[in-house]
Image (spheres, rainbow, N blue to C red):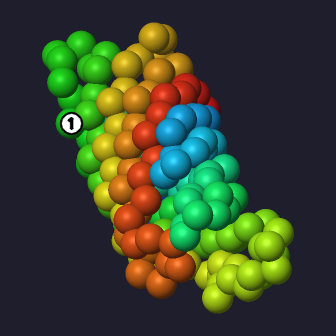
């Protein structure tokens, strides 16, 4: 009798553990839009906390910007290549969960390239810096409109504070895109 109960308990334990699932939802999104004095493209991966679009999520994003800045009469091209790691809080705006506002923030780190990495200008003048490693915090917001159960359109805006930037401390990215849930 004891053996039978023991075997049944083991068998039930295996069945119960087989019913456990990963209650997470993943999504990727691509957006493009205005970056400080230029154009930017963002690719994001979102890891939702539980299996629902109404929950908070972690975001891992790559941002690449193409911009120009005018300094002392020179029009200098510069690029930002950053990795953003953040946490976003989801706020449903309607009872059908078709429109959501996501607010969040986190850390940003990346590379700033000024004048395509050249320290010398066309006139022979030298730049003090050609860019380098940048880091700092960011805050962001996303307005999300679901067009199906697995696809949504995004309007997003992020403000970055680069503590050690040679160009400027604050930069913005604002644009639109599409998010697909996996």
Q: What element carries label 1?
A: strand
Q: Residue at x 47, y 21 (%)?
A: 152
Write down the quadrant of residue 162 in the picture: bottom left
Looking at the image, residue 150 sits to the left or right of residue 91; the answer is: right
Q: Nearer the viewer, residue 136 or 26?
A: 136
Quick check: can you spot residue 4? no
Residue nearer the viewer, 42 or 85: 42
Q: In which quarter of the image is the C terminus?
A: top right
Residue drawn at (40%, 72%), measured in percent from left and top? 169
User: In x, y percent, where is residue 147?
Assistant: 45, 11
| Viewer-proximal residue among 157 and 78 | 78
Image: 98 above or below 114: above
Q: Can residue 123 be seen in this view?
A: yes
Decide: is 78 above or below 47: below
Task: Tell me where residue 131 appears, x and y as whole percent.
Answer: 66, 78
- Residue at position x 69%, y 70% from top? 113
* Residue 133 image offset from top left, x and y in percent: 62, 82
Vertical position of residue 95 compared to residue 74: above or below: above
Residue 42 is situated, as x and y percent measured from the top left of the image, at 59, 45
Residue shown at 53%/28% (left/top)? 177
Circle count: 1
Q: Residues within 10 Å of mark 1 (few under 14, many from 20)?
A: some
Q: Mark 1 points at which residue?
A: 91
The answer to whether 3 appears left or right of 137 in the picture is right
């Amino acid at each position: 009798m004891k053996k039978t109960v023991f075997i049944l308990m083991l068998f039930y334990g295996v069945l119960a553990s087989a019913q456990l699932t990963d209650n997470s939802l993943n999504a990727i999104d691509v957006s493009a839009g205005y970056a400080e004095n230029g154009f930017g493209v963002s690719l994001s991966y979102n890891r939702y906390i539980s299996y629902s679009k109404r929950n908070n999520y972690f975001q891992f994003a790559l941002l690449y910007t193409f911009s120009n800045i005018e300094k002392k009469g020179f029009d200098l091209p510069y690029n930002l290549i950053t990795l953003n790691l953040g946490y976003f809080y989801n706020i449903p705006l309607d009872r059908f969960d078709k429109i959501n506002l996501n607010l969040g923030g986190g850390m940003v780190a990346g590379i700033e390239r000024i004048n395509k990495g050249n320290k010398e200008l066309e006139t022979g003048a030298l730049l003090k810096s050609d860019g380098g490693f940048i880091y700092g915090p960011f805050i962001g917001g996303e307005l999300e409109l679901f067009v199906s159960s697995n696809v949504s359109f995004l309007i997003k805006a992020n403000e970055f504070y680069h503590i050690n930037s040679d160009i400027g401390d604050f930069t913005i990215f604002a644009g639109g895109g599409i998010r697909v849930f996996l």
